[in-house]
Image (cartoon, rainbow, N blue to C red):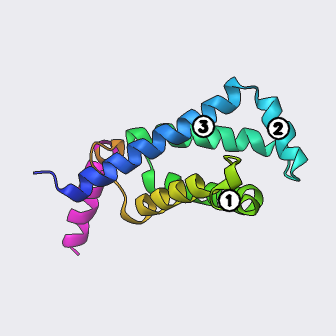
Amino acid sequence: MVNKFEVSTLILRVVLGITFFVHGLVKFQGGIENIVGWFASIGLPGGLAYAVAILEIAGGIALIVGLGSRAVSILLALLMLGATLKVKLAGGFLGAGQGAGYELDLALMAIAVVIAINGSKLFALDQVLFKKEKGAASTAAGNI
């Protein structure tokens, strides 16, 4: 029987993955050069836009399929922390009607931190790829 905790973390993991995947994809579809220019205009290296967009796409896919969820979630939480501190904090929690508040960034960061702390095993590719390896390691440890 699947427990409520695993179902809950699965939902968070997949929704977070879809959200980041779409955000990364839109950066390329809308013209990544525009994002590069915007990054440069706020004092960040323009090339960082490529790294952010690739992290969002690859990280989103990894979360959806459950591959390296904890590590990916740490990276995405750090990304949201950086976005909040560098860009959104000055606009306030709701962005003063501008749509540029940090409430969404904070929610995404919190979800990422929950997954980083707890992991998410249900329907995770990690469980398929590394199941034998973990079983062998725990058996070997038990024999010591």
Q: Is residue 75 visible?
A: no
Q: Quadrant of residue 144?
A: bottom left
Residue type (three-letter) at the residue carrying disc 2: Val
Q: Quick check: 50 left or right of 57?
A: right
Question: Residue 56, can we see it?
Answer: yes
Question: Which residue position is annotated with label 1?
Answer: 84
Q: Among all residues in the image, which is located at the extreme front?
A: 97
Can you identify the residue that label 3 sits on? 23
Residue 71 horizontal/vertical position (percent): 50, 56
Q: Residue at x 64, y 30 (%)?
A: 26
Going by the image, does 13 lie left or right of 95?
left
Q: Residues within 10 Å of mark 1 (few under 14, many from 20)?
A: many
Label whose residue precedes the other's in the sequence (3 or 1): 3
Check the image and report above or below for 33 versus 2. Answer: above
Q: Residue at x 29, y 47 (%)?
A: 127
Measured Cα–Cα span from mark 1 to mark 2: 18 Å
Label 2 sits on residue: 36
Marks 1 and 2 in Cβ contact (< 8 Å): no
- For label 3, the crowd category at 10 Å Cα-Cα, with few meaning under 14, some 14 to 19 and many 20 or more, is some
Please state the extent of the stretch shown in magenta in the rendering: 128-144
Query: Callout 1, which amino acid?
Result: Thr
